[in-house]
Image (cartoon, grey):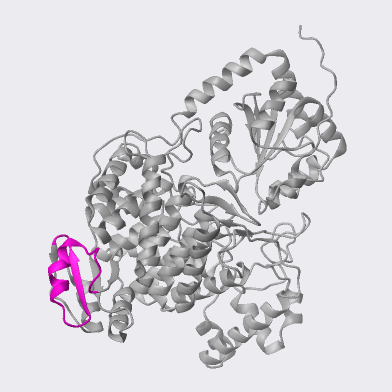
Amino acid sequence: MRPPRPPVELKNTLSSASSPYLRSAARQPVAWQVWGEEALRLAKELDRPILLDSGAVWCHWCHVMDRESYEDERMAELINSRFVPVKVDRDERPDVDARFQAAVGAITGSGGWPLTAFLTPEGRVFHGGTYFPPVDTHGRPSLRTVLDRVEEYYRKNRGEALAQAEELQRGLRQFEQSAPGEPGAGMVEAVVESALGAFDPVHGGFGGAPKFPHAGAIEVLLRVLDRRENGPVREVVTLTLEKMALGGVYDQLGGGFHRYSVDARWVVPHFEKMCYDNASLLENYVHAFQAWGTPLFGETARSLIGYVDTVSPREGGFFASQDADITLEDDGDYFTWTRKEAEDALPPDLFRVMAAYYDIGARGEMRENPAKNVLHVAVEPEDIAAQLKVPVEEVRRRIAEGRRRMLEARGGRQAPFVDRTLYANWNGMMAHAYLEAYRGLGLESCRERALKALDRILGKMRMEDGGLYHALREKPEVPGFLDDQVQVSRALVSAYEASGEPRYLGEAERLMERVLERHQVDDGSLVDTPGMEPPVRPIQDTPTPSANGTAALVLERLHLLTEETRWREAAERLLRAFAGVAPRYGIFAATYVLALDHHLHPPPRAIVVGEAGDPRTRALHEAALRTYRPGAAVARVEPGQKRLPESVQGMVSAAREPSVFVCAGSTCAAPVTRPEEAARVLKKFGR
């Protein structure tokens, strides 16, 4: 029998944290510790299990559990006397969250936020769940019940708990692991078939409720459609993008996508907005607009950009997230409308149109407050015009004016909190998407914002060893993960193409050299955090693009632009390392499959040769950038530049005026000197 330990008074240590999520809990009576060696040391010293809460500032149910349980003095007294409580910001420490999500998922079959995990003093999970209510309800145990049971179990069955934690830890070594194989075209077709099989032919998207965007799958389908027309595949892309853009999952007034829809129709969302979702979806809409010229797709992309510009830091970079609500009592109140609120904001002629267009009725879609309507496009302007017997142009004018007035009225409400932390990986994603918008929509402002964001990251977030930090608030924090390095590298390659400035390509190469040096393991795959147990090699899109898939894309693109074999060899090793496991993930392996498709069907590259200040060079460069050919690379080089791809060195030396050389593999087309010729050749050559 262990002798009783004297009581220890733990104190909440979050007041010095810079994370908005951690700071929001700094005044709670729970004695929260920050995840790290000090918290583990304290748990070992006190011989107590750890209660770990992992959540985020944008997470509604995290705030609910804080309010219901962690702000309760009696609950806090119980926690502080029996556990070492640790709080984790999953945006700040995605590596920690990923491992504990996997552990709790292995125990319960599901995960999510808030994550509630119980750990041994060594930091290994032996029990867990997600949200627990303050009282037992509907078969779900309360947090108090769980705390009592876990503490009693650990006290009476310590050996069993430790053994269970060890066994789970061994099992987790299979989580996100590589498995070698021979990558082939069949893997691309398998993702296409997986997308077709999961497609909702009525509402678009994949699967039923709740329904999440799968931007990576859409990109794979767009790439396949560029090579061959396929009616069913095109229907998947167009219907999905249309239904999302017209649904409540899209903020019809302010722009930007909410995180997901709780129903299958894309009508009622979870109202938080994430940088990463909007980055990936912006890319989808830009590319679909380039492919087919559908006005809705271009309008959605521009509106999304307008939202991101509004909420992002003025100093450069892109926002992290926006909360769903203001208080726990509201239910998306900032974004939703009662019929009376709409009537008060609009004159009668506009209200009639907007009520029909957005289906604003006396009874709306929100379960907690049925009077609240989620704005979604219910009927076409042509139908409203026929009903009101006015020209359709007049209906469109009223819709535009009605939207403006409703947005102005909404501006009088308190907006949900925007987290303007710069996360390197998400900023890399958005910078890349903005550069795609520059190419696809001709928006110079997008190029300027993307380059400004990347320059800020390179200037403010560099670690001493050349890598990048993960987060930037008042100062850079948390050494960067694999995802930070590869997402920013991808954006830097895009910046080189869009600007013609070689320094961006050089920065991308240096970052990827460091990635291969620090993150690569024996089979060519990459681990997220070197030395952390269990090792994780991210290959699933969850929902951000997988870090290994993104790395393969960057390596392939570096080879395409430089023709250096070291990049292609690294890409081949990485692709081969996951070929044995990727097929089991279906559309969740879309980023990996996109890189594989790039490898199997190398896109062409356009090399624009001419003096940077020559208007003819600029016109050729812009023509090549504007041409829609998925995956096509564009480089602008000075005639005397030392580092030229070997395949065009002879032709470049012979050029007497600004020219474009389009190459596919080892074959190059005859040089062209007019923008329209450059676009035509890049569109067709090498197919």
Percent of width and height locating residue 444: 45, 78
Q: Is residue 270 visible?
A: no
Q: Is residue 317 visible?
A: yes
Q: Nearer the viewer, residue 279 or 325?
A: 279
Q: Which residues are magenta?
A: 639-666
Figure quadrant of the C terminus: bottom left
Q: Nearer the viewer, residue 348 or 221?
A: 221
In the depicted structure, whether residue 499 falls above or below residue 10: below
Q: Nearer the viewer, residue 146 or 477?
A: 477
In the depicted structure, whether residue 542 falls above or below residue 348: above
Percent of width and height locating residue 433: 45, 65
In the depicted structure, whether residue 613 falls above or below residue 87: below
Q: Residue at x 35, y 41 (%)?
A: 582
Answer with the quarter of the image where residue 624 lies.
Answer: bottom left
- Answer whether residue 403 is magenta in the image: no
Q: Residue at x 31, y 35 (%)?
A: 523
Percent of width and height locating residue 159: 63, 13
